[in-house]
Image: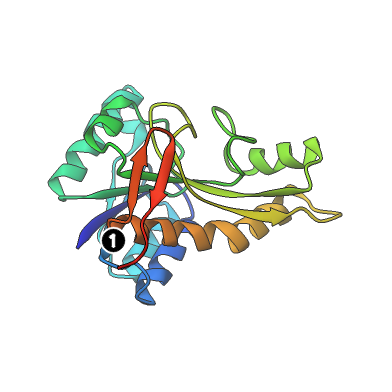
Amino acid sequence: MTRIAVLVSGGGTNLQALIDAQARGELKNGEIAAVISSKAGAYALERAEKAGIPGYVVARKDFASNREMTQALVAKLKELDIGLVVLAGFMHILTEEMVQSYPNAILNVHPALIPSFCGAGYYGLHVHEKALAYGVKVTGATVHFVNEEPDGGPIILQKAVDILPGDTPEVLQHRVMEQAEWIILPKAVSLFCQGRLSVEGRIVQIKEEN
């Protein structure tokens, strides 16, 4: 059984999608063992508590740099015997110690079809504002492995979502979550926990179910 830690900073809507998937038995061979927030009082911690999942705080404000926070996070993850790290609305750049400690074992969900609208500065509503301003007709979400480059790791799953006339960034954000993020994130987590993902360069191969 793979022990999963979900890293959060805010409301935890993607965390809730994972909790719901776990309750339905869809996280095969995996269990959410910890939720770690970068700030105290994040609503995601309440979601964890309601689901009976231990919650922890490694607050960015308690550390002089992202590097020090990353080192503290890695120490906490090792202490908890975590096998998979999931970034679900985690709003801080982690330094290389995290990737070195968990190579191809950190997943992130990004609210666009990478390589569009991604990288430094593309997070939250900004992504949807940029997609609408550019005039694309289709957007979506991507789950990828995390490497040292923001949003630059090998892609595991993607799902497209149509942009509709009259969309605002907020309306589009919710549609992308509902139609893509909340579907492909639990699926990718389950594939990892079943040992069905292998990485060759930039390509992620998904093995057939036995």
Q: Tell me if 139 is positioned left or right of 94 in this view.
A: right
Task: State the residue at coordinates (52%, 61%).
Answer: 182
Mark 1 crowdedness (10 Å alpha carbons): few <14, some 14-19, many ≥20: some
Q: Tell me if 23 is positioned left or right of 114 in this view.
A: left
Q: Looking at the image, can residue 127 be seen? A: yes
- Quarter occupied by the C terminus: bottom left
Location of residue 184 in the rendering, given as x and y in whole percent from the top left corner: 50, 58
Task: State the residue at coordinates (63%, 55%).
Answer: 176
Location of residue 14 in the rendering, given as x and y in whole percent from the top left corner: 47, 57
Picture mark count: 1
* Residue that mark 1 sits on: 194
Q: Please identify the quarter of the rendering in which residue 43 is found.
A: bottom left
Task: State the residue at coordinates (46%, 64%).
Answer: 17
Task: Determine whether 125 is above or below 72 in the image.
Answer: below
Q: Please identify the quarter of the rendering in which residue 27 is found.
A: bottom left
Please, what secondary structure does the residue beneath circle 1 have? loop
Question: Which residue is farthest bottom?
Answer: 24
Q: Tell me if 57 is positioned left or right of 135 in this view.
A: left
Query: Along the line of sight, which residue is nearer the eye, 129 or 160?
Result: 160
Instruction: Give the amino acid at mark 1.
Output: Gln
- Quarter occupied by the N terminus: bottom left
Location of residue 63 in the rendering, given as x and y in whole percent from the top left corner: 30, 28
Q: Please identify the quarter of the rendering in which residue 74 is found.
A: top left
